Image (cartoon, rainbow, N blue to C red):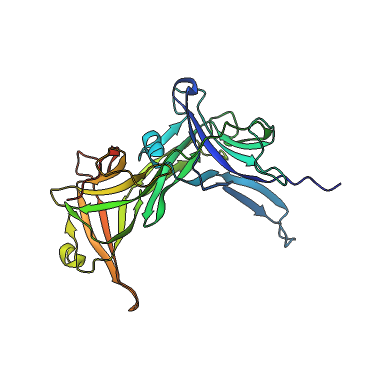
Amino acid sequence: MPATTKLHVVGMLETKTGVAGATTTQFNGIPDLRMSTGMSEWAEQSGANVDPDFLALGEQNPGLSGTMLEIKKFLDLITLDGLPIGDVGTTGNQVQAQWVRMKPFSVRELPAATKHFFAKSRKAGIYPQQITAARNRRAQITFQMQPVWDGTNDIVEFSSDVAGLTPGIVSELYALGPVNISGVELPSLQGWTYNVGVELEVNFHGGQVWPDFVAIARRQPVFECQCKDVPQITLVTLSGMAQGATDSEIYLRKVERNKKRIADATANHIKFQVNDGRITVQDLGGPNARSSDVNVRIYPAFDGTTAAVLVNTASTIVVP
């Protein structure tokens, strides 16, 4: 008989943190989720052969990456500094991703059905990568999970044909909000991208196959803002300018479920705040049949006291 076809779709991500993993958080708004096995393989051949005659696994650095819509939930839990899972002094912590089985000729299998698939890590770091917002598009955040070996279990463990998690719904959505540069609103804003700029240090100990250490080696955040205001370059100047005394502010607007945008004066929006750094125009122009684009960069810097980028996930929107 032919093999039974088993198809799955991305389901959800769940973290268990805190003492004995007592704090559970479930992320449901995940449009994309991918796992890399991260294998580095050795292939050696003897002098008499043209084909390899000895194969082995060198190092393996698996990882999980994806896109999330629940930005506030992500930032409140994971923050810009990342979230340790199973760090020193914690037990029962884990992060697991579920793939939901598709039911032939129908919809999804019920959670109670022992037909779902999980990938789990008991020790890992989760880090933000990029936040994007644009006109008439829902904002999203991309992330990466870097597993590390706990010394006992596989660095990533799999379970198939098991009961699934109780599904939730997408709990929040955000849209493009305004950008204020040193106290002046950026006109005709079309979108912005926040590259968090996290670079990880991943280390392998004593010739082990799997890494046992991860940390942020450095972080170089930058906001890239797209607008239609060509004269903006005269304000920023050709060579750019320093961040002024008034902080720059980059917003995401909260979207009300089954409705429209929430009012600016309501403290439900997300604000990113920069108090030191540089502001430049990277380029401007376009075809003669369309209005020209201007790309403005906000390059945050640490002033020795305040973080390079501050986040407030319960902010009003203030436009000068």
Q: Which residue is drawn at 37% across and 35% down?
A: 76
Q: Position of residue 269 (x, y in %)?
A: 31, 42
Q: Position of residue 63 (x, y in %)?
A: 53, 44
User: Does residue 271 lie above or below 232 as drawn?
Assistant: above
Seen from the viewer's position, the closer of residues 206 and 104 is 104
**Residue 136 seen in the figure:** yes
**Residue 207 seen in the figure:** no
Seen from the viewer's position, the closer of residues 224 and 138 is 138
Q: Residue at x 34, y 57 (%)?
A: 191
User: Does residue 293 lie above or below 87 as drawn?
Assistant: below
Q: Is residue 304 left or right of residue 80?
A: left
* Tally of numbered discs: 0
Question: Of all residues shown, which one is farthest toward the front?
Answer: 259
Seen from the viewer's position, the closer of residues 33 and 291 is 291
Question: Of all residues shown, which one is farthest toward the right?
Answer: 1
Residue 162, located in which quarter of the rendered image? top right
Q: Residue at x 65, y 41 (%)?
A: 108
Residue 294, located in which quarter of the rendered image? bottom left
Q: Where is residue 227 in the image (x, y as percent from the top left)?
A: 28, 62
Q: Where is residue 218 in the image (x, y as percent from the top left)?
A: 34, 46
Q: Is residue 110 left or right of residue 275?
A: right
Q: In this view, does 177 lie to the left or right of 73?
A: left
Question: Of all residues shown, which one is farthest toward the left?
Answer: 245
Q: In this view, does 284 lie to the left or right of 245?
A: right
